[in-house]
Each structure stands twice: as structure tokens, then as C-alpha cells.
């Protein structure tokens, strides 16, 4: 099984059998519908496309509604493809469902999502710059300082770390452990934190 789509519910804590308290994240994973299967002969690669997140049909574009109807799936708002490796079996067919039963307690996974957006930030927060002196007359308390020489090359080089948009990028957390699997509630309890705020869409893959 390649993976599953889910929604981050938030963080909690669990007490293990030896009394250890661990931080954990609850993910509502699936059920996901298989809406497309990519074949090397036709598409040039192997993958399955999953759909997740029920919504009202009128909120979907006509093309999306037709695509889901071919697979016999209800109105779903999120689509994502999961690549299949050379040694993975592509036994899933269009119209089938993927649930949390595909994962086991103790299994290692990786979770991808979009990190929390921080808006426009300065260099101290965005790049961990040190601040300037705060003595009398200082004009460089939180300013970035010099960004290039005036004579040569007489321009700002590409890649200079400067203020700008921070966060809201794709992040993948590797090596997470599945602590609990609850098929009755479509829940995965994962050790540690996963990217994104509560309610964010996440992709769970076997590591």
C-alpha cells in the first residue's frame, strides 16, 4: 500500500505500558477512494490517485464531478497521487477504498503536509540572524545589515537571505511511529508532531 490521505485533528498524549508519557498526533485518515490508476505503458509511471474529504457536489467543478462519477465515488474535495515502487503491488482498482487498516501498530511512516504560515517576517525570525547593538545612536537593532558591496558587483546577489514570506511550504516528517490504529473511527495516532495546523490535509506514506 502506497499511502492514505487524512486530516490532522490535533495533538494529545499517551501513556505507554512502561509508564512513559509521549506526545502524539491524531490523524483522521480515510476512507479514501481510488479514482485513477497510472500504468507505465500508458502514463510512463506507476501510481494510484486517491480522493478524500466529502463536500457538497455543487462546490466541485464539472470536470471533477465527472471524474469522480467514473470511479463511483461521492463528491470529494482533495485528490493526490501516490507513486508505487518497482517492488510494490498495484492491486488496488478504481472504485475501491483505502482505510487505516492498511497500517499496523509500530509501523514507521512519513507524513507530508503544508506547514503553518507565518506571514511576512524579518531576518531575525526567518533566518535566525543576530540583532545589532542597542546602544545610543544605533540604527541597526533588527535590520539585516549589509546585503552586498557597492563597487563590485554593484548589485544584490541571488540567494541573499532577506525578509520575506515565512512558512506555508510543503514539509515531510520522516520516521514517525504509529502508536494506535482505530478503524472504527478512521484514526491514526502517531508519535510526535506532524506538519500543519489542526484541520490541515496530510499525506501518510509507509516509510
Image: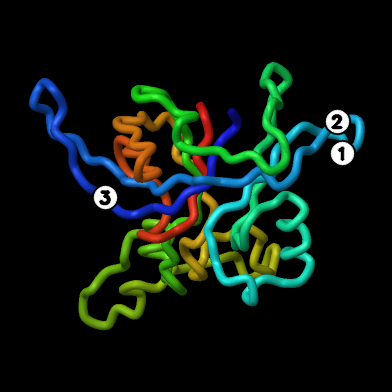
The residue carrying pointer 2 sits among few (fewer than 14), some (14 to 19) or many (20 or more) residues within 10 Å by Cα, namely few
Residue located 66% across and 61% down the image? 157
Instruction: Give left or right: position of 1 versus 63.
Output: left
Q: Report helix, strand or loop for mark 2.
A: helix
- The foreground one among 66 and 27 is 66
Residue at the farthest bottom position: 137
Q: Where in the figure is residue 87, as x and y percent of width and height?
A: 69, 16
Q: Earlier in the sequence, mark 1 or mark 3?
A: 3
Q: Residue furthest right?
A: 41
Residue bearing mark 1: 43
Q: Position of residue 108 (x, y in %)?
A: 42, 25
What scheme was used to colour the molecule?
A: rainbow
Query: In the rendered view of the protein, which quadrant contains the N terminus?
Result: top right
**From the viewer's perspective, is residue 199 above or below residue 31?**
below
Determine the CA span between mark 3 and mark 2.
Answer: 40 Å
Residue name at image x 91 percent, y 36 percent: 42
**Residue 18 quadrant:** top left
Q: Are marks 2 and 1 in contact (CB under 8 Å)?
A: yes
**Residue reaching furthest to the left:** 19
User: Residue 119 vs residue 49: left or right?
Assistant: left
Q: Which mark is residue 11?
A: 3
Q: Nearer the viewer, residue 164 or 12?
A: 12
For this rendering, which residue is in front, 137 or 89? 89
Residue 85 position, x and y percent, is 69, 24
User: Distance of mark 1 from mark 3, alpha carbons?
Assistant: 39 Å
Asked whether, in this view, residue 86 is left or right of residue 197, the answer is right
In this figure, which residue is indicated by the disc labeled 2? 40
User: Could you tell me which secondary element the residue under label 1 belongs to?
Assistant: helix
- Give 129 or 73, whichever is nearer the viewer: 73
Tell me if label 3 and label 2 are in contact, CB under 8 Å: no
Residue 153 position in % (x across, y down): 70, 63
Amino acid at each position: 500500500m502506497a499511502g492514505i490521505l487524512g486530516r490532522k485533528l490535533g495533538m494529545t498524549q499517551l501513556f505507554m505500558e512502561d509508564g512513559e508519557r509521549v506526545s502524539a498526533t491524531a490523524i483522521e485518515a480515510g476512507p479514501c477512494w481510488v479514482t485513477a490508476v497510472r500504468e507505465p505503458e500508458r502514463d510512463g509511471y506507476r501510481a494510484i490517485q486517491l480522493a478524500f474529504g466529502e463536500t457538497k457536489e455543487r462546490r466541485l467543478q464539472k470536470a471533477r464531478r465527472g471524474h469522480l462519477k467514473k470511479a463511483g465515488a461521492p463528491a470529494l474535495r482533495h485528490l493526490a497521487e501516490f507513486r508505487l515502487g518497482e517492488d510494490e503491488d498495484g492491486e488496488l482498482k478504481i472504485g475501491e477504498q483505502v482505510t487505516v487498516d492498511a497500517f499496523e501498530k509500530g509501523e514507521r511512516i512519513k507524513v507530508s503536509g503544508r506547514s503553518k504560515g507565518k506571514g511576512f517576517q524579518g531576518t531575525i525570525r526567518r533566518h535566525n540572524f543576530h540583532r545589532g547593538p542597542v546602544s545610543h545612536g544605533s540604527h541597526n537593532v533588527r535590520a539585516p545589515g549589509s546585503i552586498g558591496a557597492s563597487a563590485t558587483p554593484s548589485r544584490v546577489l541571488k540567494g541573499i537571505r532577506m525578509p520575506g514570506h515565512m512558512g506555508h511550504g510543503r514539509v515531510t516528517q520522516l520516521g514517525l511511529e504509529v502508536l494506535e490504529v482505530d478503524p472504527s473511527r478512521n484514526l491514526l495516532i502517531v508519535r510526535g508532531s506532524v506538519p500543519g495546523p489542526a484541520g490541515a490535509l496530510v499525506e501518510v506514506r509507509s516509510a
